[in-house]
Image (cartoon, helix red, strand yellow):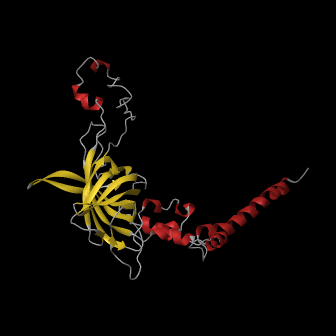
Amino acid sequence: AKDPGLLASQILSPVAMLASALSLVTPSLVTPAPGRVAPMQRSADVSMAAKDSVTAGQVAGMAAAVLAVGVQSASAGPFTRTDIASLTYQQIKGTGLANTCPVVEQVDGMKTEIKVGGNYKIDEFCLEPTSFQVLEEKLTKSGVVTEAVDTKVTTRQTYVLTGMEGDLVQKDGKLTFLEKDGIDYAPTTVQLPGGERVPFLFTVKNLVAQSDGATSSISPGLKMSGGFNVPSYRTGLFLDPKGRGTTTGYDQAVALPALQAGGDESLFKENNKKFDVGRGSIELKVTSVNAELGEFGGVFVQKQPSDTDLGSKVPKELLLKGQFFGTVVPN
């Protein structure tokens, strides 16, 4: 028979060794070792970044410039068409750059006036809102006043209108832009400080914008304004929680059978779905022009109604401000 004391010492020996090893490792887990404050970049990442014409650091810098101040104050950024065209899909993916408009490329000694004569059109027209406000009436001592309330965008970064085009003609001596095609609408939702969410269709469909005076050229200082259509936020196939719609679904709330025989006048707007088309207005001011490349850009202010939930709600007025970009090319 083996000595019990010997067996105990043989069992406890590995435990003691493990405890001794942990006592040596634990302090390094609690107290950071010198030189480990900033994470080191992996050598593989460095070698791959060195092979790219646009490094990962530059792409990160571009993304940081756009996203550092948040969605509300997103900037069109210092990125020209040439800069954006030099990036691959993988380099743009996830950075937010796809939700921005280019800026006019600045060149020393460039001409800043684009002569428009004959058959021309505006191409690659882009609108990037950087401020979303809801106009609300407020009761004050001096009476009811309308004030612009700042909001927070709850939509993902997909609200920029881009790729729009249309004829650029002269009517009564004024330059006139007739928008025809492109990504000219974007369903967007903003949230008021009280938590109420306001959905709207950001759009400039069928925009007709004229210059404020007779002119035949585009140069810094040119102002254009006009109106456009604002289609319904919902389409005909949309069904509300009660299964009601415009072209399909129920005619009334089937969950309330007692009202089917009459007495549902209070629910008339909820039951009578309709496709509302509102009107909006926009003002544009050109601040930069590159005649050699046919590029121009500037700032805009836009006013348009919000969603009516297929006619059941009174729309709110929205005030949007931002930057725009476009090119003038022969039609």
Q: Position of residue 289 (x, y in %)?
A: 35, 72
Q: Is residue 153 above or below residue 33?
A: above
Q: What is the residue that sits farthest to the right in this orientation?
A: 1
Quadrant of the image containing the C terminus: bottom left
Of residues 7 and 35, the one drawn nearer to the viewer in this rendering:
35
Q: Position of residue 207 (x, y in %)?
A: 30, 53
Give the quadrant of residue 294: bottom left
Q: Is residue 121 above or below residue 199?
A: below
Q: Is residue 266 above or below residue 62?
A: above
Q: Position of residue 223 (x, y in %)?
A: 25, 66
At 24% from the left and 19% from the top, the residue drawn is 262
Left or right: residue 116 versus residue 148 is: right
Of residues 252 and 182, the one drawn nearer to the viewer in this rendering:
182
At 34% from the left and 43% from the top, the residue drawn is 233
Q: What is the residue that sits farthest to the front in this orientation?
A: 118
For residue 223, say whether it is visible.
yes
Q: What is the residue that sits farthest to the bottom in this orientation?
A: 109
Of residues 190 and 115, the one drawn nearer to the viewer in this rendering:
115
Give the quadrant of residue 315: top left
